[in-house]
Image (cartoon, rainbow, N blue to C red):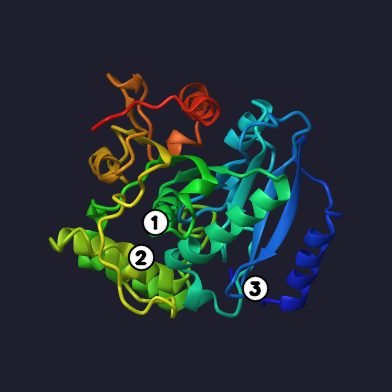
Amino acid sequence: MVTTFNRATYEEKRKKTNRDDLEVKLFGNVEYKEHYIQTRDGEYICLTEIISKDYHRNTAPVLLCHGSFTNRRFWISPKGVGIAKYLRDAHFSVWIIDFRGHGKSPKSNNYNNNTTNQHWAYYDLPDAVKYIRQYTSHDKVSLVGHSLGGMTITSSLHYGWVKETDVEIAILVGTQYTHGKASLRDPLSRLIIRFFMIMYGYFPSETLGMGNEIESNIWMEQFLAYYIQRYEGRKLIEDIYWQFNAIKELKEPHREVLGPKIVNTKVVCITSSKDNVDPPEGAYQLFQQLATTKKKFIKLGKGETSNTDFTHPGMIVSKEAAKHVWPIISHYLLHHKMTEIN
């Protein structure tokens, strides 16, 4: 549900962050702190720092970026289970972003106007990267994104909103933008979605069992327009980030294939043969579009890497992921061994 937004409350949280007297909290036995920062357009977002007293001082801090219908709980449960703890135990400095209107980041009075993936990519991620670099005194940050979190990373790097020189490596899990969702081909499905949006004033994905986070109506309109156009055969360069021109500073819609402007960043794309949400064909197409030669494509599944089938969320949130996928992510975060593929 959407609660009443109190700006004074979050301004005080931001001031506490600046004073560095943050309360230590617990996910199970995992200590963490909540850093509240204000974005360039005046919104407040929460960055969760997983506390580690023995992380690799010469290794870039890791920022985990969630996708749609979820928040920081995708990376670590209230009981302290998840890849965030795994990476902390592997001696990384681990941070988790709650994009605006998600998790601990408040749903402001502009929730249904500016809670879009455009804003994630243009404001939230660049401002988070800047803060973490300054707070940790590191020149670079490593980025890990699942699904739309991965597309946020890709878009920010492609358009230069996050500078490539500020990123050690980007790991994209279950990320693509060129293949639509079959369920949305049915007009009845789209009608039902809009019925819920009108009824609630937002899309109640948590109530419907689609995840642990609701989504704004403007975000859902982007979502529908984006995936429907894939099945109507429109050009692939009509990408999700410019459906509504929600950012006033960027009045002209960009119609570009994402990836060719990412020329120096190390990128690992991880997909699964059984991902029916963001299929491996789309992930491989995105991989091919990346201009950087420092890139690696990993396909999970039986007969592939890991010999285990993974669903879309299961590549991160599952016992099998803990065995097979988390070590892969940790390996590339630490070693950066890349294969040049033309």
Nearer to me, 95 or 85? 95
Residue 93 visible? The answer is yes
Secondary structure of the residue carrying tag 2 is: helix
- When asked about the image quadrant of residue 285, the answer is top left
Residue located beneath label 2 in the image: 241
- When asked about the image quadrant of residue 280, the answer is top left
Residue at image x 23%, y 64%?
238
Instruction: Tell me how far mark 2 sits from mark 1, CA to CA.
Output: 8 Å
Position of 176 with respect to 132 (left or right) is: left
Residue at image x 20%, y 64%?
229
Residue located beneath label 1 in the image: 155
Q: Is residue 264 above or below residue 85?
A: below
Secondary structure of the residue carrying tag 1 is: helix
The residue type indicated by label 3 comes to Thr
Nearer to me, 280 or 69? 280
Residue at image x 67%, y 76%?
5
Between tags 3 and 1, which lies in front? 1
Report the quarter where the C terminus lies.
top left
